[in-house]
Image (cartoon, rainbow, N blue to C red):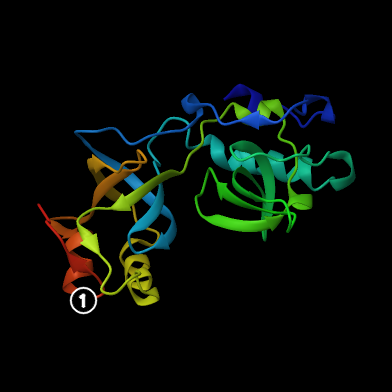
Amino acid sequence: MSPINQPVAAPTKLQAAPVLMPNIMQLSLPEGVSVDVIVSNIVDAGHIFVQQPTHPSFPSLDRLNQFMMMCYTQDKMVPPLPQPIEAGVICVAPLSDGWYRAQVVQVYIDLQECDIKFVDYGGFERVPMSQLKQIRSDFMTLPFQAVECYIATIAPLAEYFSVEAANVLDELTQSKVLQAQVISRAEDGIPYIHLYQISGNRVIFINRELVNRKVVKGTDIIE
């Protein structure tokens, strides 16, 4: 991704108009094969975001983060996201340790707030509109790295997945390269996946392990 490797330039590279998310920018999980993934965000025990560490574009993400930090910490030089803000717009938003690419998913005009989704790491946040910044055109060359997924063939024990279930999933997946298989898709197009942790000859089917730990219930689990 050569544009990412260029020095940070003056803000002339900033987009003059709001940027909507093009479908070709979003990485997806291939169907019919297993793929290496890292769980980058857990929304709840049935809803996660994954990255693909073996994808050719993945090594460029750290460099993108470095350049975005350099650009967006110069706060006075970076224009805010133009108003009115609309759902679907790509922007840059602050998090505790930097600035990251995000998509607006919901706008609350009366509160002057937005729900956003972080497109490279996953997860959702509600932030003040004033914190959102325009994105530079050269920061749109790297495909969005986080793929939103549902954990297949499990259901919550009650109305919602518990915090305990999310903690168990985190324990099983944290800092591990896993294998994911797409088995179907939800009506919204988000894939349902099977997750496997493979260590030597030992294979843990994470969907089933959550059921075995009694933090979720199984539906029609197929190995």
Instruction: Return the residue nearer the eye: 84 or 6.
Output: 84
Residue 5 in view here: no
Q: Where does residue 95 sit, x and y in percent of width and height?
A: 66, 56
Figure check: 210 above or below 84:
below
Give the residue at the far right of this rendering: 76
Figure check: 156 above or below 19:
below
- Which residue corresponds to mark 1? 214
Residue at the spot 73% in from the left edge and 47% down from the top edge: 132
Q: Where does residue 150 sit, x and y in percent of width and height?
A: 32, 51
Q: Where does residue 101 sit, x and y in percent of width and height?
A: 62, 42
Residue at the spot 15% in from the left edge and 57% down from the top edge: 203
Instruction: Return the residue nearer the eye: 159 or 185.
Output: 159
Figure check: 12 above or below 206:
above
Residue at the spot 42% in from the left edge and 60% down from the top edge: 42
Q: Quadrant of the N terminus?
A: top right
Task: Say left or right for 72 vs 59.
Answer: right
Secondary structure under tag 1 reads loop
